[in-house]
Image (cartoon, rainbow, N blue to C red):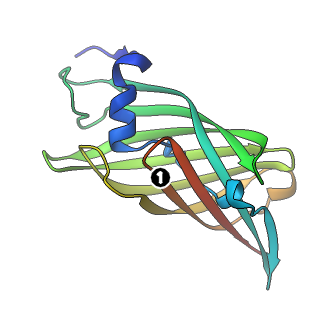
Amino acid sequence: MGVAALSLQHHYSYKEKFEMRSIHTAAAVVTACLAGALGGSVAHGSGGEVLNLTARTEQFAVIDVGTPGPALGLGDQIVSSDKVFRNGKPVGTDGVTCTVVKATPQAMTCNWQMTIALPEGQLTLQAIADGPTGPPTEPIKTTFAITGGTGRYRNAHGTADITDNPGGTEQITARLTN
């Protein structure tokens, strides 16, 4: 049982089918996560801050640790990075890792870790989420826990709603609480 990294070109269509993230995910992830392209950025509410961001996948890979095949199995990983936008302008990057913790012929469950790097600091997010084994026919929304950060976000906690849209972008709405 060796580890084989599959090429981006070979699995890019699978990325679109399962989770154009990030989570990754995270984005992943994450995602992660992000109406920035629609005009949102930072809003201050009662006791917190809301970040609206958009992420677009830049790099993507699948690590297949079990029997090679077209579908992800237990222990396989999705690793990706995104360009992050606020109000349509690039402001940072993110990195997402999804580890498959359950796989059936109809669905899979991933443990997502995502880090978003912005000029003000970094945010870390985590979630477990179910997803299809085939192409999504509609956006997939996952709520991530904000587990920490650096810089301006060093005491960060809260939640981030990440919507993975068919076509390669994610909307991230991070609600930071004090």
Q: In front here: 11 or 122? A: 11
At horizontal 53% and vertical 58% (from top left) the residue drawn is 162
- Residue 172 vs 72, above or below: the answer is below
- Other-residue count near label 1 (Cα within 10 Å), few / some / many at <14 / 14–19 / ≥20: many
Farthest residue toward the bottom? 46
Q: In front here: 178 or 17? A: 17
* Amino acid under disc 1: Asp
Q: Position of residue 159 (x, y in %)?
A: 60, 68
Where the C terminus falls, by quadrant?
bottom right
Could you tell whether 76 is left or right of 151 in the image? Answer: left
Q: Position of residue 87 (x, y in %)?
A: 78, 54
- Residue 71 vs 159, above or below: the answer is above
Could you tell whether 60 is left or right of 103 in the image? Answer: right
Q: Indicate the secondary structure of the residue bearing disc 1.
A: strand
- Residue 30 vs 69, above or below: the answer is below
Could you tell whether 73 is left or right of 86 in the image? Answer: left
Task: Report which residue position mark 1 lands on.
Answer: 164
Residue 98 appears in the rendering: yes
Q: Position of residue 97 (x, y in %)?
A: 49, 38
Where the N terminus falls, by quadrant?
top left
At horizontal 77% and vertical 40% (from top left) the residue drawn is 90
